[in-house]
Image (cartoon, rainbow, N blue to C red):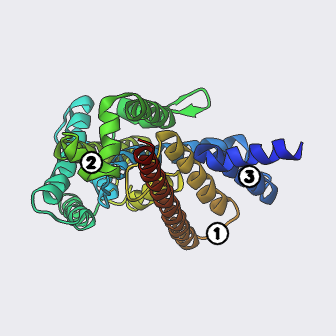
């Protein structure tokens, strides 16, 4: 009996997603004991709404980090898109579908700019994306004069503010995106190429994989999804705000790294990233429920990012040790085979 329990525990620890789910369940129990209202229906709905908005950016960030890159402009791209979709509808009287597509296209262009700086000018990804972030931030304040843009289109506001049963439309869109991108990563050739570019760029080039194409896709995709998150938040709030999604990039990075996606690229799953988003959302919500100020919440999220990066560092070292051990075993088997011949 003890051996079976030991083997079950070993399987849970070795299976990254199972371990994350176990941690998530433990956190839910602890927070519920701490505050009896934590798992109330209204609070669960609040958590799902929050998870949806950050989860959309986390999907794009997960693909980008797996490919070996990172984007620190996602939050500001989302703010820009939220303001632009409001301006297009209210100031220029565009139909909401046209305004939505144009705002997402601007987000994709921001990702394109980041990719061009990284690939052609050889900027480090964090420098390139910080530059794009500053451009987006400055542009938002110039075109709005630091004022929010109210939205009067009732149908557009239903996109982000409606529900299907107990689930918000934003949460449903987020889950659908996680499923679609998870399928792409696991079952398509393009998904395997993304893993190879992030895990071993040299081997990917030798295998004939177009790493430039992968990098452009990852950045453009992240920019477009960040824009979508900003647009949905504007729809839900009924206003395009210059500060609506600021900080969402670091939150998304924390979630995906916490969910087991290696910051160095090449490993991780969308399921793990989704569980990471759920853990981070529950953690942030618990801090609100127990009454901590916003400053403490920001600090706690930063501490959680540090913890996630430390865990990722030791996971990476473990993978390196296993790879070295496997390489030695392969070399030893080759030596034995040669001696036997």
List the residue tagged with mark 1: 292
- Residue bearing mark 3: 26
Taking the image as shown, residue 225 lies to the left or right of residue 28, namely left
Residue drawn 40% across and 28% down?
187
Where is residue 116, by image quadrant? bottom left
- Among the two numbered marks 2 and 1 on one chain, the one whose residue lies closer to the N terminus: 2
Nearer to us in this view, 197 or 324: 324
Q: Nearer the viewer, residue 130 or 168?
A: 130
> Upstream in the sequence, badge 2 or badge 3?
3
Residue 207 drawn above or below residue 183: below
Q: Residue furthest right?
A: 1
**Mark 2 or mark 3, which is nearer to you?**
2
Residue at mark 3 to residue at mark 1: CA–CA distance: 21 Å
- Percent position of residue 65, x then y: 36, 52
Q: Position of residue 307 (x, y in %)?
A: 55, 67
**C-alpha gap between disc 2 and disc 3:** 40 Å
Q: Which tag is nearer the camera, tag 2 or tag 1?
A: 2
Q: Give me the disc on residue 203.
A: 2
Asked if the residue under mark 1 is in contact with the one under mark 2, i.e. CB atoms within 8 Å, the reply is no
**Front position among marks 3 and 1:** 3
């Amino acid at each position: 009996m003890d051996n079976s329990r030991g083997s079950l525990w070993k399987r849970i620890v070795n299976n990254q997603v199972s371990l994350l789910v176990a941690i998530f369940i433990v956190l839910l129990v602890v927070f519920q004991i701490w505050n009896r209202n934590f798992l109330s229906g209204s609070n669960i709905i609040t958590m799902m709404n929050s998870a949806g908005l950050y989860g959309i950016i986390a999907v794009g960030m997960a693909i980008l980090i797996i490919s070996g890159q990172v984007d620190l402009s996602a939050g500001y791209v989302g703010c820009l898109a939220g303001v632009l979709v409001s301006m297009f509808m209210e100031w220029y009287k565009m139909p909401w579908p046209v305004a939505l597509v144009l705002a997402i296209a601007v987000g994709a262009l921001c990702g394109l700019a980041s990719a061009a700086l990284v690939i052609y000018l050889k900027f480090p990804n964090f420098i390139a994306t910080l530059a794009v972030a500053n451009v987006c931030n400055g542009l938002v304040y110039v075109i709005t004069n630091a004022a929010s843009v109210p939205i009067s289109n009732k149908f557009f506001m239903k996109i982000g503010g409606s529900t299907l049963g107990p689930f918000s439309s934003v949460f449903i869109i987020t889950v659908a995106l996680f499923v679609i991108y998870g399928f792409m990563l696991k079952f398509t050739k393009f998904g395997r190429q993304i893993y190879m570019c992030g895990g071993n760029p040299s081997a990917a080039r030798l295998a004939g994989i177009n790493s430039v194409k992968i990098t452009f896709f990852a950045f453009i995709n992240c920019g477009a999804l960040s824009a979508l998150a900003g647009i949905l938040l504007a729809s839900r709030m009924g206003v395009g705000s210059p500060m609506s999604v600021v900080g969402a990039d670091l939150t998304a990075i924390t979630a995906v790294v916490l969910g087991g996606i290696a910051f160095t690229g090449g490993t991780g799953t969308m399921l793990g990233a989704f569980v990471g988003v759920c853990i981070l959302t529950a953690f942030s919500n618990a801090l609100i429920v127990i009454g901590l100020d916003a400053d403490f919440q920001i600090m706690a999220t930063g501490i959680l990012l540090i913890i996630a990066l430390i865990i990722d560092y030791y996971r990476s070292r473990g993978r390196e040790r296993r790879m070295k051990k496997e390489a030695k075993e392969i070399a030893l088997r080759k030596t034995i085979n040669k001696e036997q011949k």
